Amino acid sequence: MEENLRNRRILVVDDEQRMARFIRLNLEHDGFIVEEAYNGMEAINRLRDVMPDLVMLDVMMPDIDGFEVLRMIREFSQVPVIMLTAKGEEDDKVKGLELGADDYVTKPFSPRELVVRAKAVIRRTEASGQSRHDVIEVDDRLKLDFDKREVWVEGELIKLRPTEYRLLFHLVQNAGWVQTYDQLLAKVWGYEYRDETHYVRLYINYLRQKLEENPSEPKYILTERGVGYRFIDYRRN
């Protein structure tokens, strides 16, 4: 595998565990890091946890089909998605693409075809600037590397819990813009938590304790009273 695509993270979603592991082995052989999920809701939760570079999503699943999972993904993420299906009907392909899929592979497929498609979609996404991120130097004391999942404060690597990391990611991705409680709850916790605004306050406090020089007078994560929070627009510094 070419070096510039090594260690990209792929989430494989298929209710047939043998198929998921078959795909995993072939992708890992080419240098990808692979996560698995076996149903729709597990896929949504894993997506928020691991923040993959690509999702391979089976259409035919028992609880929530792949089309509905894709629809849910597109409500909070633009991660590239390749749909996997045993069906070859043109209508299914059109439906997946209209919902925001980036590619479509029909079972049975060769391992080589799947790897080639994965590389092509990741290359295309990264060329358009949608996936990989530069190291962000907010100021002299705070540096963020979302590709390596690293946060540095005054030269020291800071350990963030998965939810803290997701919250920081969405704040920084929208630096300078206010993110409402509803937006953050949907993106970080999921729509089932839309009434739990205290979660946002609690985890903002956790982040401030780890990132801010003086958490009671924050300069990175600012409160927009009654609305939500805003990460300082570091690009203007």
Image (cartoon, rainbow, N blue to C red):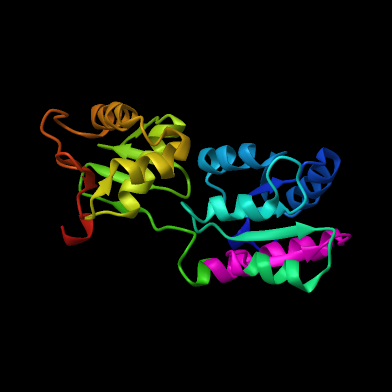
Horizontal side, residue 53 vs residue 211: left or right = right
Number of numbered discs on residues: 0
For the record, the magenta segment spans 98-125
Nearer to the camera, 39 or 166: 39
Horizontal side, residue 131 vs residue 234: left or right = right
Nearer to the camera, 109 or 220: 109
Q: Quadrant of residue 224?
A: top left
Q: Is residue 8 visible?
A: no
Residue at 50% in and 59% down: 78
Q: Position of residue 44 (x, y in %)?
A: 57, 42
Which quadrant of the figure contains the C terminus?
bottom left
Horizontal side, residue 95 vs residue 77: left or right = right
Q: Is residue 158 above or below residue 70?
A: above
Is 112 inside the magenta-drawn segment? yes
Which quadrant of the figure contains the N terminus?
bottom right
Q: Is residue 131 above or below residue 218?
A: below
Q: Position of residue 48 (x, y in %)?
A: 51, 41
Nearer to the camera, 181 or 132: 181
Residue at 79% in and 44% down: 20
Q: Position of residue 146 (x, y in %)?
A: 43, 48
Q: Residue furthest left?
A: 217
Q: Is residue 165 above or below residue 236?
A: above
Q: Quadrant of residue 187?
A: top left
Is 26 inside the magenta-drawn segment? no
Q: Is residue 205 above or below residue 182?
A: above
Nearer to the camera, 10 or 77: 77
Q: Is residue 152 visible?
A: yes
Q: Position of residue 179 (x, y in %)?
A: 28, 48
